[in-house]
Amino acid sequence: MDNPLLSMTGLPPFSRIEPEHVEPAIDRLLADCRARIAELTGPDRLPTWESFVEPLEILDDRLSRAWSPVSHLNGVVNGEALRAAYNACLPKLTDYGTEVGQNEALFRAYQAVAAQEHLNPAQRKLLANALRDFHLSGVDLPADKKARYREISQELSQLTSRYSDNLLDATNAWSLLLPDDSRLAGLPESAMGLAAQTASERGETGFMLTLDLPSYIPVMTYAEDRALRRELYEAYGTRASDQGPHAGRWDNGAIIERILALRHELAQLLGFANFAERSLATKMARSAGEVIAFLEDLAARSVAQARAELSEVAAFARDHHGLEQLEPWDLAYYSERLRMHRYAIGQEELRPYFPLPGVLNGLFGVVERLFDLRIEEVTGVDTWHPDVRFFEIRDGQGVLRGQFYLDAFARQRKRGGAWMDVCTNRIHTPTYDQLPVAYLVCNFTPPVGDMPSLLTHGEVETLFHEFGHGLHHNLTKVDYPAVAGINGVPWDAVELPSQFLENWCWERASLDLFAAHWQTGAPLPEDLYERMIAAKNFQSGMQMVRQLEFALFDFRVHLEYDPARGGRVYEILDQVRDQVAVMKPPAFHRFAHGFSHIFSGGYAAGYYSYKWAEVLSADAFSLFEERGVFDTETGRSFREQILEQGGSADAMDLYVRFRGREPTVDALLRHSGIAA
């Protein structure tokens, strides 16, 4: 295997990946793939599962295993040379993907295998998905429309990458250097330390604020200086747009319009009325009407409570702090003060009890008890940054099930947010065996001096969430990559394991495994825990309608696209806000210009999936509430029916096998403190 992007161990050779080698290596792999496909679809071949599908799965995996570390590095150590190599390869990979999807000889061979007997359910599901995806790639189209599909796919891949690059560049470009701490009154010690450390790392003296979330959120939540909050709010809310401190420099406006136009055209080429309908072809939800009704039903149950919660904050700011007009850059600040006033608890009071090393050990302890696992760190593994750690997961019998990298801290040239992604997939055939490996990426505050990384409780939930995705990938027992782990799982079901695992961040029995003061080792005091639980659903109505705003905007902007009128992005967003938002941003705010989930991620016309899967996860957890949060039988059932099955069966069928019935919305409303 003479390709610098592949390793004999199955793990990416990060230290050997040089940007100048990426494009030639991908070119060689693509040539190999094309030659092998031509061989497998030759006129004298009789396609069977063993002679046709298995070799193709291995072929696809080889390409995926080469591209995965390049794509990953572009997100976590982004630089000019790597970005150029990544963007040079994108059109080639997109072209190859479209070419494969429109290959009629391949399509006929898959049809022939699907018609054969002696296939197991996972094989049948893989073949059904493959045949569906051939249709969604335009295999049925006439030659001129196939060519247009290919052009659109090429341009979309380049536009979504440019959108992401613009957002990263705009985020990195802004910083504010303060010579002393006079404007930072109210900030917690951890945030002050990070600001000083950031300035020092960049060769400056004083305190440096950035738009990375570990810097931005503490300012918005704690800074007494209202003008400072306003300055950061505008800089963050206008990133990559025509407004704000870098107006026009990395403007995503035209890119958004073009993406929406091309998605609409692509959907219509395939016979769908719009891209929202195209999106649902691979999801649990059966129609656009069902999605809109689902979101609007949740809105109807939540908006009145959300408005009441906003009124409470405004009244508190006026009566206790003399603020006559509550603005968006005041909301987090006065909400935190109201939380402290009402419950005598804030995120910073909890932070000392959640040092990352202890939280990690506790997280591992929770899943070990729930799912009969053992998780251990492995040292000496090649990584892309000194902070990155590597772990392996074994089951109760000692069998190695999967591995994962953990990249926990925010830094320059690293994309914001948190995510799990596939490094390698599980494959098991008579001649080929490969373990699943995952990337887990977060953007927590790094250690400062002798102080370890201290997490807010919300960040603890984030870590549990991403680890839930990782378990879904790592614990799969499906042997075929296309339906193993998270692959082949409908997008509106894929958040089930992640949101499900968040529930253990609130249970006393699980918190006792890891919530301990970083200096004294003292466990989380009972009175502090009781206040934390009392405050759990603080402003839950506002949190609900915020997510519904994002979901409705995303779905409607794809559902209602009209070529004659364009995307009407902010017109539709204003309409959605009239329906569900309780506080509207100012006119300069450019939310869509930074909504990377739908314009450069995989959530286009699918952001509703978070709420859809939250119904599943709350309903699933309710079974543990009935039987005990560490009930081993229920944990084994969730592992066997959900985590190990991947995309090998219908998502609702798997859920019913676990829960004994279809989900209801009741548990979500109860967990959110919203009246049914």
Image (cartoon, rainbow, N blue to C red):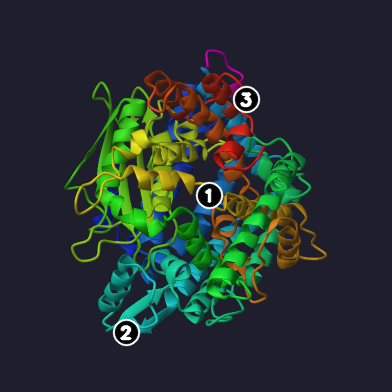
The residue sitting at the front extreme is 319
Comparing 476 with 430, the one in front is 476
Placement of the N terminus among the 4 image quadrants: top left
Q: Are marks 3 and 1 in contact (CB under 8 Å)?
A: no
Q: Residues within 10 Å of mark 2 (few under 14, many from 20)?
A: few
> For the residue marked with disc 2, what is the amino acid?
Asp
Residue 662, numbered circle: 3
Placement of the C terminus among the 4 image quadrants: top right
Residue 180, numbered circle: 2
The residue sitting at the top extreme is 118
Q: Residues within 10 Å of mark 3 (few under 14, many from 20)?
A: few
Q: Earlier in the sequence, mark 3 or mark 1?
A: 1
In the image, residue 19 lies at what x, y percent? Answer: 34, 63
Check disc 1 and report the residue beneath it.
96
Comparing 509 with 29, the one in front is 509
- For residue 50, what is the image quadrant? top left
Res 403 seen here? no
In the image, residue 102 lies at what x, y percent? Answer: 62, 43
Residue at 23%, 24% (x, y): give it.
398
Q: Is residue 354 left or right of residue 576?
A: left
> For the residue marked with disc 3, what is the amino acid?
Glu
> For the residue marked with disc 1, what is the amino acid?
Tyr
Q: Is residue 616 left or right of residue 308?
A: left
Q: Is residue 320 left or right of residue 172?
A: right
Residue 253 within the segment the image draws in magenta = no
Q: Earlier in the sequence, mark 2 or mark 1?
A: 1
Q: Secondary structure at mark 2?
A: loop
Q: Which residues are magenta?
A: 114-119
Q: Report the number of discs.
A: 3
Comparing 148 with 14, the one in front is 14
Report the magenta stretch's main SS.
loop
In the image, residue 552 lies at what x, y percent? Answer: 69, 52
